[in-house]
Each structure stands twice: as structure tokens, then as C-alpha cells.
Image (cartoon, grey):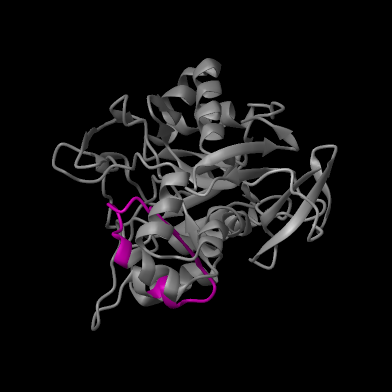
Amino acid sequence: MISSRQVLLTDGQFHAARIEVSQGRIRSISALGRDEPPSTDLILAPGFVDLQVNGIDDVDVWSTALAGNTIAWERINNLLLDQGVTSWCPTLVTAPLDVYRAAIDFVKNQSQVTGQPHVVGVHLEGPFLGDAVGAHRVQYVSEPNAQWLRDHADGVALMTLGAEVTGAVEACTVLSTSGCKVSIGHSRPTRQQFEDCVGAGATLVTHLFNAMSGVHHREPGLATWALTNEHVYASLIADGIHVVPETIALAFAAKPNKMVLVTDAVAWRAGAAGRVQLAMRDGAPRLEDGTLAGSAVTMPEALKVCVHQAKVQLNQALLATSTHPAEVLGLTDRGRLQSGCYADFIGLNVDLDIGAVWVQGQRVR
């Protein structure tokens, strides 16, 4: 049993509550008596769910998966736990079509180890991108191949594609039918192209404001439609560099119930994301020409930027780190503190640093 004066519950508010755990799941949540001392002074919240992790520190997801390197994989998992991430999507960026299968199979075959983060499934960011390629290798960007998608959907939880590419609507339909969620990103579509993809099953927009048409008072783009369409969530890299605090505040004000924080983290210390070479400059990983290439932010750091710099309410920011990303993937067994859900939760101190992490009820940090 764990209890605190500040527990973020499913109504999106903090309560004095106790959490009882049984067999890795939350058995019950009940009110903590006024005179009952809590077992911890930490703020308790659902474990972070990160939908976009290309690598961390010196470990790259693509390279690790292709090499079948289980030691490096364990290091990624441990770094994630240090950051309070209890569920995640290993992310594979644009590459030749024939190399994905081996990497997807490696990720899929990583059995859930007790006390390690849940691998929800692969996030394919490419290769079917639109007109805002960003740091991806343009020579491998291609139009959607419906049969390839059918052949590779197993093990994939999420795919980011361009809404303006030929075959985008069919791709959304194929992926949705296969149980894979679809996100629009690296894209400069028309409004009709955007709406057609949403109608075909797209439910997310990848890294709002970055690598997409934006917000303009006479020429709205993907960012505008993402913020004003009630059917889609919007992910955001809240490092203060990809998106400055004032714009983070604007995004949360426009869409407080469907914001999703992602790190889009890369192996910045190793200097690569897959085969894309990068270097840290001005606080973020970049290509030689200065193009942003993922981030070095952690989820606790992103949370602090939202709360301390963008002045987002803590409960709203925390929902964007856990509940909303779980909703994007249709996961009802995590991302919230509720009876029956995995007992995956974190404890934050007053400075919003990670003070404790539990995975399936076991304290791992």
C-alpha cells in the first residue's frame, strides 16, 4: 500500500489517497483520512508513456535493434526508468524498406522483463513522409505501399506519415484495420488531405509545430487544424527549443485534453539517430546545416518546461505525459491510476524530479 496527500486520479485532480496493489495491478484506490499519515511525501502520478523514443544518451534504437544487442536494449530500459518512463514506443525513422522487418522483429521479441518498462510497440516515423522531411534521409522517403504495410503491421503500434502523399488515405485505412494507430507528421497537406486522413483513421499529429505547415492568420496549416480538430491529439516536444514556452502555453490553452508530450529523444551522445549523423549545438541535436534532429530532453525535463516556463498547470502537464498518450494507443490498462490498471506510477518531489518509480507494483527506482 502506498499513500500520499497528492495523488493524480482519473478526474485529473490531486487527492489524498492510498493505492493498494495486487499481482502487479492496482487493486483499489481509497481516500486517505485527514489524520492518517501518508507513506510518502512525493506527488504520485501515472508512469510516463513516451510514444517517440529514437534513442537515449549514447544508445540508438535503430542500431540496437538491427544488431540484436540485448545489452544495449537493457541500458535503454534502465535509462527510461531513471526518467520515470514505464511504457514506450521504440521509434524507427526513415530507412530503406527492406531493413525494417529485422528491427521490428527484434523489438517484438523482447519479452516483458519484470521491473522493466513495457514496450508498447514500434513507432514508425517514416518512410512515407510528406513535404516536410526535416532531418530524415530524403533518398529513402517513398510513397505508401499498402502490401508492405500489411506485411509489417504486426509489432507496430503507431505510424507517422504525410497526409499529402499519394496513397495516404489507403495507408490510414490499412493501418487502422490492422490495429495500428496513425499520426500525421512531416507534412504540409491541404485541409482536405488532412481531413481525409482523419476520416480514414488518423488520430494524432506528430510533434506539433515542427516539420509541418503551421499557424498563420490567413494561411492555416497542419498545426492549426491539429489544434482545432476535436478528433485528433497533438504530440509536442516541450524542450523549450523545438517549441518555445509561449507556444507551449498556446498549445495547452487550445487543446488541454488532447496534448501529448513526447521526448523524440535520440542518442545524442553517440552522434547518430539510425544512420543520420548529428551533433549537439545550442541545446539540441542538429544536422550539420542546423536542422533539428530529435531532442536530448527527458520527460521530467519536459514537464518542468511546461510547468515552470510555460505556466501549464501541473495536473494538465502530467496528463499529457501519461493518460493522453495511452488514450492515443487505445490502452485502457495504463496511463491512469485506476482499479485494474497496471500499478505503474511515479513519485515526484517538489522540484518535479523523479523520486520513485514503480512498475507493476514493484519499486524499481
Q: How many marks?
A: 0
- Residue at image point 47% right, 45% down: 300
Give the image location of residue 56, x and y in percent.
42, 32
Boundaries of the magenta span: 225-246
Residue 88 is inside the magenta segment: no
- Residue at image point 31% right, 26% down: 269
- Residue at image point 13% right, 41% down: 289
Q: Is residue 223 above or below residue 290?
A: below
The image quarter containing residue 156 is top right
Q: Is residue 221 above or below residue 234?
A: below
Give the image location of residue 344, x and y in percent.
69, 43
Residue 247 seen by the camera: yes
Quadrant of the frame with the C terminus: top right
Observer-nearest of 34 and 42: 34
Give the image location of residue 39, x and y in percent.
74, 43
Q: Is residue 321 above or below residue 84?
A: below
Residue 188 seen by the camera: no
* Residue extending furthest toward the front: 35
Observer-nearest of 49 and 347: 347
Observer-nearest of 166 and 69: 69
The image quarter containing residue 184 is bottom left
Relative placement, left or right, of 71 versus 37 is left
Residue 240 is inside the magenta segment: yes
- Residue at image point 25% right, 45% down: 292
Give the image location of residue 33, x and y in percent.
82, 59
* Residue extending furthest toward the bottom: 218
